[in-house]
Image: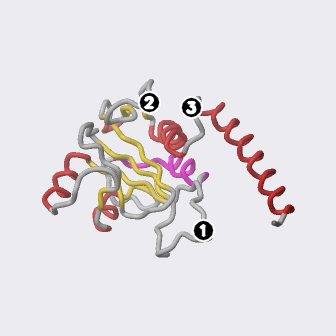
Amino acid sequence: MNVTNLEKLARLIKDKERIKKEIASIIGRQAQLGHVGEYVAAHIFNVKLEESASHKGSDGVFKEGPLKNQSVNIKWYTKREGLLDINPNGIPDYYLVLTGPRTVAPSSRGTTRPWVIESVFLFDAKELIKVLEERGVKIGIAASVKLGFWDDAEIYPKQRDNTLELSDEQRRLLSLFQ
């Protein structure tokens, strides 16, 4: 047994817990990826979050702009794997998906899932579900979404979908998480 590595691991875990407490004090919820993603998206995209983190179907509504009062479910995936969690019993108007890098490796051994935002996608939920059902895709956890749909829904770094045009300030804020 390598005691030095065990001691180092214990110290790193303590550091991680300290950082999680700091994050929780900022966002007002547990320092979990989903909650942090909701906080980030709410501030960058002007979303009024629901009081309860377990609100059925959506995390909040857009407060202004072309999507004002439209419900949104916010997702933050550490890697872009072509999957989207869809609750068929609670469909929002939109899915706003923050992702890390696209995955290429078949194995995750020895890798990490960094909390970074490389891309952002905006899906019209009803439109997406209609297309997925037409293709015979099962709607639920880890629904497979074809690459072309992701490309069409991209709003950052490339603005391919113009439903929600990003300002320079929104782009700057998103770049802080790269």
The numbered mark, 2 or 1, whose residue comes first in the sequence reads 2
* Eye-nearest disc, 2 or 1: 1
Q: Are marks 2 and 1 in contact (CB under 8 Å)?
A: no
Q: Percent position (x, y) of residue 33?
A: 54, 46
Q: Helix or strand or loop: what does disc 3 sit on?
A: loop
The region drawn magenta spans: 164-176
Ranked by sequence position, the earlier of labels 3 and 2 is 3
Quarter in which the N terminus is drawn: bottom right
The disc labelled 2 sits on which kind of residue?
Leu
Residue type at numbered disc 1? Thr
Q: Select label 1 or label 3 by which is in front.
A: 1
Which class describes the residues within 10 Å of circle 2: few (<14), some (14-19), or many (20+)?
many
Marks 2 and 1 sit apart, C-alpha to C-alpha, by 32 Å
Q: How far from the left and from the top, in percent, is residue 19? A: 71, 42
The label on residue 29 is 3
* Percent of width and height locating residue 177: 59, 53
